[in-house]
Image (cartoon, rainbow, N blue to C red):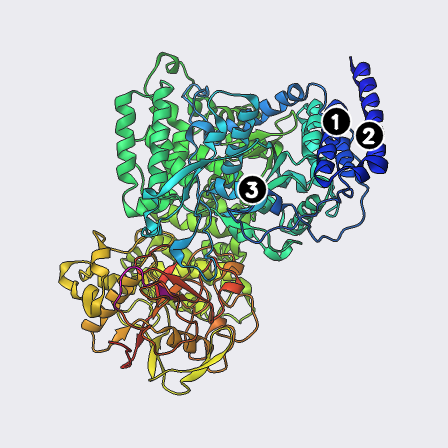
Amino acid sequence: MKTKGIFITLILILVGTLILFVYDNFVQALLPDNWVGIVAGIGAALVIIVGFLSNLDGAFNFVNKLLGKKDPQPTQRKIKQEDNTSASYQEFNAPVTIHHHPQSIPEPTQSEPPIEFEDSLQPYLEMVERRSQRLPLAPLDPTGQEIGQLGLGELFINLNAGESAITKGRLLRKASHHYRAAIGHIFHNQRLILLGDPGSGKSTMLRFLALCLARDHLGREGEWLQHLRWELYQPEDNKRLQNKEENSEIVYWQGAAPIPVLLVLRDFAAQNFKPADPLAIWNFACKQLQDDKLSEAQSALEYAARRGKIIFLLDGVDEVPPFDREAVWQAIAAHDAGVFGGNRWVATCRILSFDETQIPETDLPVRTLEELNRKQIDTFIEGWFDAYITAGEMTKTDGHDKTTRLHNATRRPDIFNLATNPMLLTIMAVVQTYHATLPDERAKLYQACLETMLFRWQRHKERESDRDLPNVLMQLGTTKERLERLLWEIAWEAHCLAPEREEAADIAEDDVLRIARDHLGDPYKAAQFVEYTEKRAHLLIGYGGGKRNVYRFPHRTFQEYLAACYIADLPRANKYFGDGEFGPQLRALAQKGDAWREVLNLVAGYLVYVINRPQDALEGIAEILPEQLPNADDVGNWHRIWLAAEMLSVVKAEEAKKNIFGAKLLPQVRQQVTSLVETGRLTSRQRAEAGDALGRLGDERKGVCEKEPWLLPITEDLQFKMGEKGEPVKIPAPYAIAKYPVTNAQFRFFVEAGGYTQKWKECWIKDGLQGWQYKGNRMQPYLWDAPRYNLDNQPVVGISWYEAVAYANWLTATTDKLYRLPTEAEWERAARHTDGRRYPWGNEWQEGFANSDEAGIGRPTAVGIFPDGTADCGALDMSGNVWEWCQTRWRDENRRDYPATWRDDGRENLAGGESVGRVLKGGAYYNGKDRIPAAARCGGYPSFRDFNGGVRLVVSPFISDR
């Protein structure tokens, strides 16, 4: 049959060639113009038939010749800086500038799909499905048998990632598309870097994507591409973006599903690869197929990869040893420029481990996973217990009762703060499943989950199959405490092997057995312990090609908590640290910074909340804190200050004050961490974390948490260069501007004074304001309770222009000063001085001078922690952090834009309705350096309120048009 097809194809090619010859030499000159296209079309149709019978690519080349086109050149790819929801797929297909040694890239081995293409892929896709479906903390019944109906596909909740940037020159509410789901960002970006905190769901996100794509290819029941869905917000003209739920539609993954190839970069980095080799990643994928005994799928995958039908899921750049990360990024860039570069890819990394300077390519889209919101938390809780009910592991009554209990618990602010992390929420669900109450502190949660996983079969409802279960403690001849200490030591050794990784480290089976023998005194019991903790408790997971010769904890957070318990247990800790005291041991770890940060915070939590030894925690923190402020370049000792502040914030300021020693320690820690943030020590991200710790301990800097701001007078040189063109503008009168944006602590005075009630209605309607009618039933800013935005020393966000003006009017009514929003000219003069500089600090961009997208923090920081970015007048955060409302109109009632250069033309009039847009200045944490110059401006309708809008106040007798 195949020979006959080839024979027919050859005849058709000869006929087509003859037609082309006759057409070129005789027919084209004789036919009218309108017939030329018809004949060409007939010839093209014939050649397309040829293509389907022989070679599709050859057919299209023949068509091009027939129509007089040149041979197509290879498409080069350019990686886009930001995703564009309206961009076509082809826009992503452009060059990467990459320099590497020339490599010999083999030509495709075949142009047709391999015989039995789908059949050869099926075992591979089934393997992807099987591995992706399994939960790292899968709830197992007490007999150790997996509940078959419960898996990732049933429990996954959509995660949000990043925010859409504001388009230059547009009003905020005019965005044509707005989506937050990580799946949406992955779909709209041909290649993407996805960042997240520990336990934020980075790996789970990739596994869920792989699961859905694999199940779609396998034809599983359930329309699995529709599980890859997200909300697309399309605000109407008179709607505000924060009312997304009222004005959104659900969209799904469109088009053919790419074939998922999930690669663990830690394992890739362990191979002997050349960073500039464009085949390095592909060769590793092939090796994985061989290791999994799936080599028969390689030809089919190669065929798909050469046609851009693959999505490479590159998990865990942060798991790679630091000295290898740059080489891994180079390998990804080389892959992108090679023969398989037409495929999609997503790479994940921990936020604190991400270093954009290691990436050869600039302008790669980067998104950061957000914390879970209330709706996501509730959805997960309901799905968790519904799955137990469906699996027959829980009665409906019991399941609904536990659902209600966990719903109620997560409405407490302290527990809600923990539940916003997917890993911690999963732990809560595990604990609630087997416990009557839920602990309210992180270390207590881990301890409860540890006990649940180790011993829950003793607490579970009694069943016939349970009665004969062996008592593991009796069988091993040990106690609960000794068994826990055994796990502590395993975790300690594992963490010492790779403290900088986000994921749990590998520890050799021989080392696990050695530690178990030391504790249990018997190699047989050691083997029993390993078998139990892996197969029954699921606290150790075995890995290895066919042999389980390496073990890992199910998540790094377990490893960190157990290592923290080991450190807190002084006598056993001395085994590794010698005869030193507890404090010096902590100090040695604190100097290392990020690598031991989570462990040290859990040491404090364990000492205070699990074993009730707060004095030990406070004394350890005191030992970590340097006796005096270190030199500017003494990074290790600045690490100590940062981590001492974080550990004390775990203890909590209120608890420290109850202790005589703690009451003395608290102001010392505050003073030193204040110096850290005010002098700009450590990296921007580390300083942001230190600023958060200061906010939790009580930020006593002037003008940060006090009712009134720290005012900076601007009384001279009122003429300056304004706008991008630097046109001269003179401000009519002197004024004073706040050193910082208004903080949450400052805005709380307004909220708690009844600022949203009838008592202060006048503040919302004064001078023709229409704020009261747009306030509605609100009693606080949008996102007021969101942990990401609500520290006392963070700038308030989620306020509309109406709320900002009402707050200023309230502050005026309750003080002896006349507060208001700055005019755009006043704001820009404060930021640019008189010389029209581009940024508050000068004309050139400087890394680390502002909380912008380049800083990689991904959220508002405590105010004033970028001292190098201070304006000449002394104001901070005038570039980056949050957009700041100005009094000035962006456009008038007829929707005509005012000119960018300020003039006294009525634009400062406070009256006007929703159609009168208002100016915002300064840019926000997610904007790049080109969006945060002092001249940059944006407009927003006065009722708009979202994650990016704050305010800074001024005091001045000059108020135009009032």
- Most extreme residue toward the left is 759
Secondary structure type for disc 2: helix
Distance from Cα at disc 1 to Cα at disc 2: 10 Å
- Residue 870, percent from left and from top: 46, 74
Q: Is 674 a magenta residue?
A: no
The amino acid marked with disc number 3 is: Glu
- Residue 844, percent from left and from top: 57, 72
Q: Which mark is residue 493?
A: 3
Q: Which residues are magenta?
A: 911-919
Q: Quadrant of residue 348?
A: top right
Q: Nearer the viewer, residue 851 or 607?
A: 851
How crowded is the residue under tag 3: few (<14 C-alpha within 10 Å), some, or many (20+)?
many
Q: Which of pointers 1 and 3 indicates the residue nearer the eye?
A: 1
Q: Quadrant of residue 618?
A: bottom left
Q: Quadrant of the N terminus?
A: top right
In the displayed structure image, the side of residue 214 where residue 43 appears, left or right: right
The amino acid marked with disc number 2 is: Ile
Q: Quadrant of residue 509?
A: top right
Residue with the mark numbered 1: 46
Q: Which of pointers 1 and 2 indicates the residue nearer the eye?
A: 2
CB under 8 Å between discs 1 and 2: yes
CB under 8 Å between discs 1 and 3: no
In the displayed structure image, the side of residue 788 where residue 768 appears, left or right: left
The amino acid marked with disc number 1 is: Leu
Give the residue displayed 44% in from the left and 45% down from the top. 179
Residue with the mark numbered 2: 19
Q: Which of pointers 2 and 3 indicates the residue nearer the eye?
A: 2
